[in-house]
Amino acid sequence: MAVSIADIQKIRKMTGAGLADCKKALTESDGDFDKAIEIIREKGQAIAAKRSDRETSNGCVLVKAVDGFAAMIALKCETDFVANGADFIALTQSILDAAVEAKAKTLDEVKALPLNGSTVQDEVVARSGITGEKTELDGYLYLEGGNVSVYDHMNKHTLCTMVQTNKPAEEQAHNIAMQVAAMNPVALDEASVPQEVKDSELKVAIEKTKEEQINKAVEAALKKAGFNLYIAENEEHINEGIMKGNITEAQAEEIRKIKKETAEQKAANMPEQMVQNIAKGRMAKFFKDSCLLNQEYIQDSKMSVADYLRAADKELTVVAFKRFTLRAE
């Protein structure tokens, strides 16, 4: 049967599919709109299955706050060409609107929400049929309650944040939302850092401290013996030194012996209290760099985020924040 331009445009408006796909679906369905839409959805399912192992490193991240409920979500795809398309951004916005209206708490709840006569997940799968790329939802986060500031970094839809304060403070909350975007804190304060993270960071701090102390002792021993530290740094440099005639085979063996014996001796006699004290210092730096309220305020490094908030109101603080980005960090 002949397919009219009006029918093609109607299906395109309903599905967002390309004109050629709409015409083909209408032709195959003999003009039945419901069947045509189903054909387009089935195409999306086939493409989604075929490209399931593809990486979705691009996409669109949006954030929104309405009447005491704020949320962000990412609709991910394979290329920035698709991600920057108006239809792709519009679909992301419609999904976020539905999630906020329903006050959804999980990504699975969002996927099951009704959208355009179907479900959010069906619309996402159908988008694969339109773009030819793997498409998936990710990064659904929410905050409940008032005093939430939302921020879309540079309005590029790749990094969004939400910050909630304990009392109204629009300017300060917005500035801290930008802080969260720029500095990527892992927790609100030291108390809110998960214990497993603290344990892991302390272990790394102790190991790094011991390694540094051993390296210092080895360097001192090599210097005392009169060896060039560059040549003694590793086997590659030692062999290079031999080839260039800078050291002899015997000197190379002496270097290896000094490094081995000094490292073993230092490791066996390292003061535990000294190691713990240095490690504690490293942990203090970790908390300063990684905890939002402890971080240096990006607009004035002479004060912390907590100091900045107290300067506006001595009782003002941040009670929660969320952040999601598509960028590799």
Image (spheres, rainbow, N blue to C red):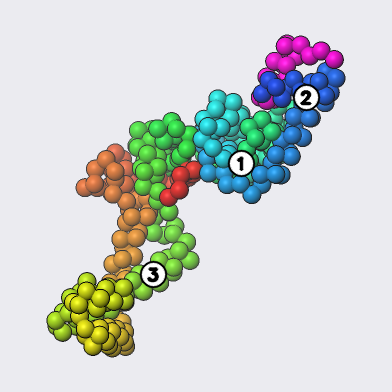
Task: Give the label on residue 137, or none.
Answer: 1
Question: Could you tell me residue 321's position as x and y percent?
Answer: 45, 45
Residue 252 lies in quadrant: bottom left
Residue 10 lies in quadrant: top right
Give the structural element (helix, strand or loop) at label 2. helix
* Residue 10 falls left or right of residue 273: right
Residue at the spot 85% in from the left edge and 19% down from the top edge: 30
Residue named by callout 3: 204
Of marks 1 and 2, which one's residue comes earlier in the chain?
2
Callout 2 crowding tier (Cα within 10 Å): few <14, some 14–19, many ≥20: many
Mark in the foreground, 1 or 2: 2
Separation of disc 2 and disc 3 at Cα? 58 Å
What amino acid type is highlighted by mark number 1? Answer: Leu
Q: Is residue 116 visible?
A: yes
Question: Could you tell me residue 270's position as x and y percent?
Answer: 28, 84
For the residue pair 37 and 97, the one nearer the viewer reads as 37
Separation of disc 1 and disc 3 at Cα? 34 Å
Vertically, is 140 above or below 157?
A: below
Of marks 1 and 3, which one's residue comes earlier in the chain?
1
Q: Quadrant of the N terminus?
A: top right
Of marks 2 and 3, which one's residue comes earlier in the chain?
2
* Residue 323 falls left or right of residue 105: left
